[in-house]
Every structure is written in C-alpha cells, then in structure tokens.
Amino acid sequence: MVLTHSTNHTYSHPFPTVTLAYFLRYSSPQLNPFAAHVLSTDTISSHVDPKTQRLYTTRIHLKKSRMPSAVYKLLPASVSGGSSGEKASYILETSVVDIKEGWMKTESRNLNFTGVLSVVEKQHFKVPSTPEAIARNETDVNSSVMFKSRLGEKIRGKLGQAQEGGSGWLPGLLGGLGAKGIQRSIESLASTKTIDQLSKSRDGMRLVLERLRNGGVIGVMEKLRQERQRQTMTM
Amino acid sequence: MSASLAPECNEVKERYDTCFLKWYSEKYLRGAEKDNKECAGLFNEYQKCLSVALKDRGIDKLLDEAREDNKENDVRLTAPRK
C-alpha cells in the first residue's frame, strides 16, 4: 500500500528568491529555527547541463529522525536502532532548477530505515501562470509526500532489512496482525506526523525568505559568516 | 553555515557553500555565465574529503541501493502495459 498527500501553496516572493531560500533553508538554526533537527548538510554533486542550462544538485542531509515514536514502538530495537540509540536518518535530496523556464523540481527521500518506511517528498516550484500573480511576484509550489512501508516484503530479491535484523520476531508479529496491517499502521502514523511537519517546513522557508527580503543574500551570508566566527571563538 | 557530516570537512565545505551561493545568486539567477567552474576547485577539494567519510559511514552503499531502487522503479514504470 502507498499513502500520498498533496498540497498547493503560494509564496509571496519571486521565484529566484524562493529557489535561493530552498538552498539556504538548512544553513543555520539562526537563519531558520525550524531546521534545528538538521544535523548536517553536504553537497555530493552539482552541475549545469550545457544544453538546457538547468542546474542539477544532489545533497545529503542528516536529520534527527522524524519517524514518529509510535512507529518505533511497533518495532523491535534490532530494527529501529533502539529507543536510546541514534535516531538519525540520512536524506537524499535532488533538485533541478530551470531559471529560463521558471521552475524548480525537488525530491527528498530517506536512505536508511527504507525496509521499514520510505518517505519521498517532491516539490514543484514555478512562476505562476497568470500575469496578475507574476506582477505580484508570487511563486506557486505543489508538494507531495508518498509513504510506503515495505516491512516484510522482498526487496531486491531478498527479504527487507527489517526481517533480516529481526531474527524471528517478524513472522510472529505478522501472523497476528498481518504484514499489510502493520504496513498500513506505519504509513498512516508517519503521514499524520509529516503533514504536521510540512507546515513547519513552510514556516521555515517563509522565515528565510523574509530575511532575504530584508538583508539580501549578501546580508544573509554576512550573518552566517559572523555566526561562524563566534562559534570558532567559543570553541 | 550548517556543518558537514564529517567535521574534518567543515572548513572546505563552508568555503564551497559560500562560493556556490555567491555564484548562484549573482550569476546563475541573473542569467549570466551559467557555468559554475569558479567553484570547481573548491568542490573537488571538498569531495576528496567527503568521499572518505561517506565510505566510512556506509553512505556510499545506501546511495547505491537508492539508485538500484530507482532503476527497478524505472523498469516497472516504463515497461509496456500488459
């Protein structure tokens, strides 16, 4: 089973600024307090297609796990990493910007825990279609999130990591509740939590956008530089 | 600026990020000079440092798996319908 959730939103900022805010949104908890759960951000590839002039970027974020605690409670420690253990997930983020055509498409997915739950978030930012909205300097975005639990399914020809690590607990659990039932519970628990977080991530984007409006990118970068210096001094 | 997952790469990562953001906001978004070659040297230096950390933490394997999954999905979604 797969659960999807889709929303539309309009930012009252021009498209180029919104794309910049997207790249900046995890730069610092001071710039975006809603990103305090982001532990690290790394770029692993970045290139401009010489033909289309589109910018392709791939980044890896390490986030304190957003898997709801209710999901953890459904799983044995061998799968979830235990309640006291590190609950961080690696997120792979790919994005394409086409500045000429005025759109940006992004996709984020978790790299670990995929045997339990895959979450794929896609966003499509674009210059609005009506001249009035363009004149108002707005940017439209459609966001969709897909949840899919593959607990107990065969992945790449072998049983998912969940069962491999779970030495014997899964058949019993599935016997009682059924694999589909557990998958559905995990998907719906995760989606309830994520939909709540989507509005926080929009709040974060709005905050970064406001700071860009007030200080411009140079101002924002200068703030980040000062913050970095302070951190070095206190270290 | 946010940290790198490998603390030893923080410094070069920050220099690259700053270069990228400057290039992106001042050139790419303004439709001038599309190539981000000016940050290429820093990027290579950064990747040299980061690739070790990705291997150590097993993230390179996770990336390969994610690519495998995508391939499987591509095959499934682009297969002729029966």
Image: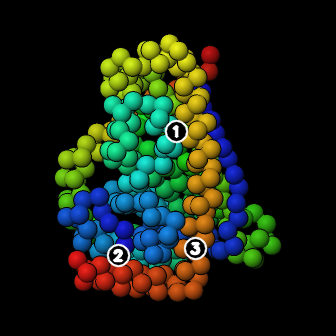
Q: Which colour style is shown? A: rainbow
Mark pair 3, 2: CA separation: 23 Å
* Residue B28 in view here: no
Residue annotated with mark 3: A207
- Please name the amino acid that badge 1 sits on: Ala
Tags 1 and 2 in contact by the CB under 8 Å rule? Answer: no
Instruction: Using the image, tell me which numbered label, if any, was put on residue A135.
Output: none
Nearer to us of marks 1 and 3 is 1
Residue B43 sits above or below residue A30 on the image: above
Q: What whole-number distance in Å separates the C-alpha atoms at marks 1 and 2?
A: 42 Å
Examine the rendering and report whether any part of residue A44 can be seen.
yes
Q: Which residue is mark 2?
A: B19
Q: Nearer the viewer, residue A48 or A170?
A: A170
Crowd band around label 3 with a 10 angstrom C-alpha radius: few (<14), some (14–19), many (20+): some
Q: Give the quarter of the figure containing the C terminus of chain A.
A: bottom left
User: Which residue is label 1 attached to?
Assistant: A70
Amino acid carrying mark 3 in the image: Leu
Sequence-earlier tag: 1 or 3: 1
x 44%, y 31%: residue: A75
